[in-house]
Image (cartoon, coloured by chain):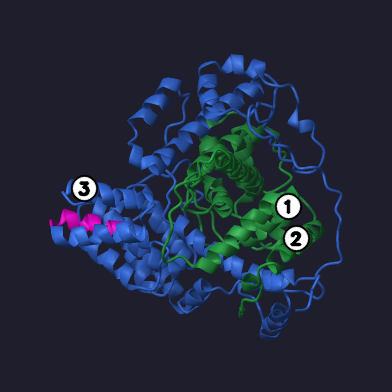
Chain colours: A blue, B green
Amino acid sequence: MTVVGIHPEELFDKLQDGELSSAERERLRAHLDGCAVCRFEYAARLDFRSEALELAVMSPPPALPLRPLASSDTEAALAAAPVAGRRRRSRLMIWSLAAAALITASGAVASGLVGATPWHTLGQLFSQQAKPQQAAASAPTKLAASRPGPAAVPAPEAAPGPSFDAPPTEQASATTGDGPSAKAAVAASPEHARASSKPRAAEAGTLAAAVPPSSGDMPSAKDGASKEPLAKEPASAAKLFGEANEARRSGDVGRASGLYHLLQDQFPGSPEAELSRVTLALLLLDNGDAQAALSGFERYLAGSSRGLEAEALVGRARALGRLGRRDLEVSAWQEVQRKYPRSIYGRQATERLSALGLP
Amino acid sequence: MSRRSEPQTAPAPTLSAGLPSNEERARALANRAAAGDLAATQEFLAYVWPTLTRVAAGVLGARHADLDDAVQQSMIALVRALPAFRGECHPAGYASRITLRVALRVRRNLKRDAGRREELGQLGPVDEVELDANDDALGSRRRELLRELLEDLPEEQAEALTLRVVMGWSLDEVAQASGAPVNTVRSRVRLAKEALRARIESRPALAELKVSP
């Protein structure tokens, strides 16, 4: 195995952008044949990209009104949250906590302690909420603005925990580069799937514009800059998926459903379309259409994608339960239990089976 | 500088790679947020949320039980750090750097706690990360190897490697995100890859895989 010290980073970039020429692809292939590190990187990029697909169904919580939170508000919310819904609860708290932090940050600004508020545990943060002035007054006086170097990230100091130091300034240890314009990137299977759908993209954009606009209002966007009609740009699977998710988050079920269907119709081989089957099915299930939801889950499970198998299995079991098909529901939960015994879904399956009088 | 994704006010974590566009607006929002504008803060957090979620998931794993907490901590740290943001790098890059530190700290803390439990003879799962029977075992091993490496790399190299491999950003984008010259980023990536080489050489199954761009 040849040790290669210079890696064709630009080739990776071009691959990522889909701009790799045939000659460049050959160069990249030749490099990969001899460089275990770049082979690993190439595969790892696909791995992380694949994992990121799971995140696509995680929606940011709806915008909460930003206001100073009393600690009792937060604690009450935490206490009210079901234990089994930890992730949901946590996500819903993100905005509140960020808002809470803002209050602290504002206090710091007002007292001239820019960027120097200490890093607190959440509990400390809550109590700090109740006493913003006191908290600001007790903050260290080190000014982050005095840190050297470009774009230095300030370092909230870890009160009890590990430190959070700013990156040291680096006086560029520039190298000579990667040789001739390298290119490259991950021509992952997702891209391939998407590329095969490209001819239909413009059509999809036109169709997407016909879907009624969302009635929901995303956080901010007061100037409407981010709400341009879809038809102004060619649609892509990712864009349609994003639009559909946005509609779903804003509660516009009809538009979201239409966009998910459009995505599945126009980009049938794309990973976004596969993901959307689960997302749409969950949406339908939450809105009372268990039969359609069941079809969506089963279609996803019949495909080759496995990133959301757990969610699809659980969704199928829930849909069967809603439809009163007990025998099939039991089988579905048992499958969840068997495949994901140590997960939150496994516990959910156990609880449900127990409720149904089964071990 | 490539721009691969159009701005959405609060999109799901995007599948497309690349720094989010609308950088100037994000800078303006960051400035207003730093001055205490609540609406701007909300909009800014929505803008960076997909990026920092992907960074945190890259370090911890998309199904990690502490992912939400890490994202939450990152957002709080970001809000607190905004007053020191001087606009010399992309706002999403600034957010990603803070998130990387928070996520690595969460990861290290978990490992430390696991070590303590081991010392006490209380072996058990560190968290409730589910075991996916259908997960790509090799892919999981690659991701985990890279995550372990990130813990041990110098911060700038860990940052460069994360943004390159986890986020799929170009050299230009990493430079824009970190406020460093492109050649500096190139150097950091090269050094990180040398460290990576040492790791994977001890694992032939990972080193010998076949790929086809």
Residue drawn at point x = 47 percent, y = 64 percent: A238
* Mark 1: amino acid: Leu
- Quarter of the figure with residue A73: top left
Closest to the observer: A85 or B18? A85
> Which element carries disc 2, helix, strand or loop?
helix
What secondary structure do most residues of the magenta stretch adopt?
helix
Question: Position of B150 compared to B126: left or right?
Answer: right
Image quadrant for the N terminus of chain A? bottom right
* Mark 3: amino acid: Ser
Residue B109 in percent (x, y) is at 60, 40
Magenta stretch, residue numbers? A314-325
Mark 2 on the same chain as mark 3: no
Residue drawn at point x = 73 percent, y = 69 percent: A9
> Which element carries disc 3, helix, strand or loop?
helix
Q: Are marks 2 and 3 in contact (CB under 8 Å)?
A: no
Residue A354 marker: 3
- Which residue is the site of mark 1? B153
Closest to the observer: B105 or B87? B105
* Mark 2: amino acid: Ala
Q: Are marks 1 and 2 in contact (CB under 8 Å)?
A: yes
Q: Disc 1 versus disc 2: distance between alpha carbons?
A: 8 Å
Give the chain of mark 1: B
Mark 2 crowd level (few <14, some 14–19, many ≥20, 10 Å Cα): some
The answer to whether residue A259 is visible is no
Give the chain of mark 2: B
- Which residue is the site of mark 2? B195
Q: Disc 2 versus disc 3: distance between alpha carbons?
A: 50 Å
Q: Are marks 3 and 1 in contact (CB under 8 Å)?
A: no
